[in-house]
Amino acid sequence: MSIDVVTFGCRLNITESEVIRGKADVAGVADAVVINTCAVTAEAVRQARQAIRRLRRERPDAKIVVTGCAAQTDPRSFAGMPEVDRVLGNEEKLSAAGWAALDAGEKIIVGDIMAVRQTALHRIGRIEGHTRAFLQVQNGCDHRCTFCIIPFGRGNSRSAPVGDVVAQARRLVESGAREIVLTGVDITSYAPGLGLLVKRILNDVPGLERLRLSSIDSVEADTDLLDALGNDARLMPHLHLSLQAGDDMILKRMKRRHSRADAIAFCASVRRLRPDVAFGGDIIAGFPTETEDMFRRSLDLIDECGLTQLHVFPFSPRPGTSAERMPQVAGDVIKDRARRLRGKGEAALRRYLDGEVGARRRVLTERGGLARTPQFTPVRLTAPVEPGVILDIAVASHDGRQLLAA
């Protein structure tokens, strides 16, 4: 490849990094390093800046191009870094014309992401270094959670046509993909319905062995999606939920659209339909105005929803969001609450792993002697196996983080 891409953030960014490689190659870009940034937290932005400085030291003659959500939302700050040659917007990074514009002389090539009304389904194959195939079906978000900068980096919600998604899924299976992961910014907002799309893929691509969803917003889960979960074993029993908090007042101040009771009821409903389901969840520690009692309700939510895989985000104010202007929680309190959430999550995971010992699971192999169960639980195999193979294994034990095969 004539360019190297360093990716931060979500599965959607991983997918788009492959598109970047292809579009930059078509545009004739050579000897360039692209940093595809994330803007979810201040820490993600800090890590991107750190990488930019390091890459300039390592590649003094390469052209350094910064793109992604952090570049879209704050292009001038990256353009002000002496290490950076060009800043490219989130829409521009996905077109050969955007990459061709690098030679036009402008340092900032960032358009109005809110003006974008359609999302193209880019044809990419299996991603190097990944066993699963990622399939982007949606982009952008119409919601305005008070802590979130991402709508300003991604624009409004837009969905790829059903027929195009199904055709791409078929091509991925024909190229050897055993599992496909549907990705997007807010995939449960998929129009005309995520459940309809899932059913079409499962029905029209019979050769697909495993279909997985990335993070979902439970309040948007439709009846077709629940029906597919309950009736088609090829839809993997693992849901990662965008929960964010367990206290109703904090959820209201976040402008989330679900209540604590909604989240608990959703998990119970899915578990009745699919008893083998495993839930993950995102929770923010130390959102503005969060008291100790409010925080304890987030801690309790881990058990009440039966979460086993937790992503904890210490709150960091994002410039331009409403939460930035709210009364802030002290930094040391945020750190302590994040620590306590992670500890509770680790205990929940250990209990879940305890229950898996002695079970038989069909796993999809990855590199380095690892595999994943349908619930996305990592498994350490007794010996490395070629990636992309589905095996039937017995679980012998665990080490607190992953299962160990017999």
Image (cartoon, grey):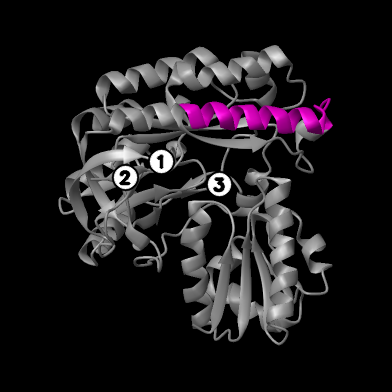
Residue at which label 2 appears: 404
Residue sitting at x 42%, y 43%? 214
The Cα atoms of the two marked residues, 1 and 2, are separated by: 7 Å
Image location of residue 147, percent across then percent down: 69, 34
Residues rendered magenta in the picture? 325-347
In the foreground, 57 or 153: 57
Residues at circles 3 and 2 in contact by the CB criterion of under 8 Å: no
**Quadrant of image for the C terminus:** top left
Q: Which mark identifies residue 140?
A: 3
Q: Which residue lies at the image location 26% right of the left edge and 22% below the top edge?
A: 273
Disc 2 element:
strand
Q: Position of residue 342 (x, y in %)?
A: 58, 32
Rate crowding at label 2 as few (under 14), some (14 to 19) or many (20 or more) other CA atoms within 10 Å: many
Q: Earlier in the sequence, mark 1 or mark 2?
A: 1
Front disc: 3 or 2: 2
Residue occupied by mark 1: 399
| Residue type of the residue flagged with mark 1 | Asp
User: In the rendered image, is residue 259 in sight?
Assistant: no
Residue 122 in the magenta stretch? The answer is no
Q: Main secondary structure of the magenta part?
A: helix
Residue at 73% across / 63% down in the picture?
Answer: 50
